[in-house]
Image: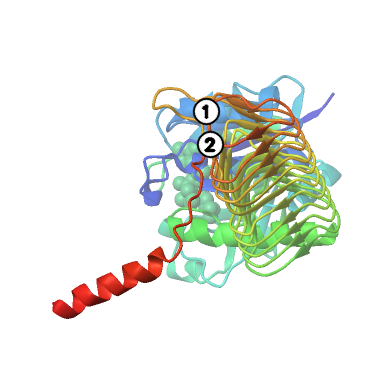
């Protein structure tokens, strides 16, 4: 079967990022930059991809394997001798059966699959040797310029090699090609480094192709072809991608207000609402009709249908059941499972704790390493004392138990089903089901004492 393989160039260091992390791995919308390009190529119909790696190749290779498995392989370019040399390095890694090749740069994350598909079919239709994306930009400085003669593409001139007149040309090479493999092999073998940088330029294959067949130029919008070379360009690309992601989910029936940032790996269901300034990261999944109010930040959180998060709640690596309610100002830390219709209210912090259906902790509590039974109520100011300085211990509260305000539960400890813990109790022993636990001292009222005390203190103050 004739296959289309994508070759993605990502061996460069990305010096202008000024980072210890390779450019390919710089995060954008929660995902490494390079993954956006590989995904677009696969979505456009490439059967597999070969990524040319160099700088930090072990880390880049590992990340690609995690994200794409066997569909993406790597080829090593030890020394960066130019884009043409990089593609040469990829040739040996191509599987037999590859008929045509899609060549992309790993630092153009806004590429769209639909433009790549148009490029591939433009080449396929005439069984051409080469087709390329082109675009016009207001400021073409730094880009290779597309050279035409009587409208036909005849070559590309790098900015640094171009004449003044050629530099005035606003039609640029965004670095995306589709080529017949047999032609490409021959053209790459004939490259020579006779240019200002002494490198092997991939772009020289355009001149070779134009000699034997038409080179078809496929126009694409310039904003989808922007290269990321420094952090200002990274920020601009991320902003554009955030707009694209939000628009995509709006079309799927999600209400999204201004200032919302949604990572690329997030999934949203119909009729969910994201209020102003919500940030959704990682693999967060928001169920149908869920309502996420102003300023909430969620990372790797599964939110059930109809759940409600009130403003400024911060949640990570946790699940919220159907119609659960969280916030305002709740901190839901990793491994929390808030059951259906359960409530976690203001200034409540949870960590590694399960609240079963309908359980409530509405105000000012710390719930760590706990299990709270169905319908149980945890009063304001309750603390699960889970840590002894060396180890964590579990607090278990039975179904429908009631924990009075300002209680401390010193773990490991269990409060049985339906038991009551009186307000202000320090629970150090298990409480049997339906029992009342009470550890505070008895109250004594000294009649008239406050008035006498006031008079005494006043007299003392007057004496000086
Ligand atoms: C290249 C094009 C230029 C085009 C521009 C679009 C060439 C000669 N020039 O220039 O016409 O307008 O892209 O952005 O192709 N890479 C390797 N190995 C190398 C060199 C580069 O893997 O030896 C990779 C880089 O990691 C990067 C990509 O190829 O992802 C492009 O390299 P870069 O040096 O940025 O090329 P430009 O000078 O921008
Ligand atoms: Mg570049």
x then y, percent, for residue 61 = 54, 27
Q: Label for residue 302?
A: none
- Asked if 205 appears above or below 142 in the picture, the reply is above
- Disc 2 element: loop
Residue 427 rendering spot, x and y as whole percentages: 55, 32
Q: How is the image coloured?
A: rainbow
Quote the CA–CA distance across marks 1 and 2: 9 Å
Residue under label 1: 428
Query: Mark 1: is the Cβ under 8 angstroms from ligand 1?
Result: no
Q: Which numbered disc, 1 or 2, marks the residue that appears first in the sequence?
A: 1
In the image, is residue 460 above or below residue 232?
below
Quadrant of residue 377 in the image?
top right
Q: Nearer the viewer, mark 1 or mark 2?
A: 2
Percent x, y of residue 237: 57, 58
- The residue that label 2 is drawn on is 439
Q: Are marks 1 and 2 in contact (CB under 8 Å)?
A: yes
């Amino acid at each position: 079967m004739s296959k289309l393989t994508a070759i993605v160039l990502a061996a460069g260091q990305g010096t202008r990022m000024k980072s210890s992390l390779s450019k390919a791995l710089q995060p954008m919308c929660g995902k490494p930059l390079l993954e956006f390009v590989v995904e677009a190529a696969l979505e456009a119909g490439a059967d597999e991809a070969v990524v040319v790696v160099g700088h930090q190749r072990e880390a880049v290779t590992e990340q690609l394997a995690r994200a794409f498995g066997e569909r993406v392989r790597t080829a090593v370019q030890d020394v960066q001798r130019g884009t043409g040399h990089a593609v040469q390095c990829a040739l040996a890694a191509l599987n037999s059966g590859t008929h045509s090749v899609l060549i992309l740069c790993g630092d153009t994350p806004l590429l769209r699959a639909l433009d790549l598909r148009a490029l591939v079919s433009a080449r396929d239709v005439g069984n051409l040797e080469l087709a390329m994306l082109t675009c016009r930009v207001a400021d073409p400085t730094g880009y290779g310029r597309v050279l035409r003669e009587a409208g036909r593409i005849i070559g590309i001139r790098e900015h640094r090699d171009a004449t003044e007149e050629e530099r005035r040309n606003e039609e640029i090479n965004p670095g995306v090609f589709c080529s017949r493999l047999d032609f490409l092999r021959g053209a790459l073998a004939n490259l020579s480094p006779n240019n200002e940088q002494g490198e092997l330029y991939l772009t020289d294959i355009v001149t070779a192709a134009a000699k034997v067949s038409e080179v078809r130029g496929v126009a694409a919008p310039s904003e989808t072809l922007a290269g990321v070379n420094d952090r200002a360009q990274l920020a601009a690309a991320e902003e554009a991608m955030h707009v694209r992601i939000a628009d995509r989910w709006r079309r799927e029936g999600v209400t999204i207000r201004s200032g919302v940032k949604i990572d690329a790996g997030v999934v949203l269901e119909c009729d969910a609402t994201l209020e102003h300034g919500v940030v959704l990261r990682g693999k967060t999944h928001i169920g149908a009709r869920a309502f996420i109010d102003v300023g909430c930040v969620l990372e790797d959180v599964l939110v059930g249908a109809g759940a409600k998060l009130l403003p400024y709640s911060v949640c990570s690596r946790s699940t919220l059941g159907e119609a659960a309610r969280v916030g305002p100002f709740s901190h839901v830390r990793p491994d929390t499972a808030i059951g259906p219709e359960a409530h976690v209210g203001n200034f409540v912090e949870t960590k590694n704790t399960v609240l079963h259906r309908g359980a409530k902790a509405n105000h000012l509590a710390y719930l760590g390493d706990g299990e709270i039974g169905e319908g149980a109520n945890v009063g304001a100011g309750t603390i699960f004392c889970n840590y002894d300085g060396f180890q964590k211990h579990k607090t278990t509260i039975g179904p429908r138990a009631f924990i009075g305000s300002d209680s401390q539960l010193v773990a490991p400890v269990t409060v049985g089903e339906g038991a009551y813990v009186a307000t202000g109790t320090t629970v150090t022993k298990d409480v049997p089901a339906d029992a009342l636990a009470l550890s505070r001292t008895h109250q004594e009222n000294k009649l008239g004492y406050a008035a006498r005390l006031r008079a005494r203190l006043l007299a003392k103050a007057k004496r000086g």
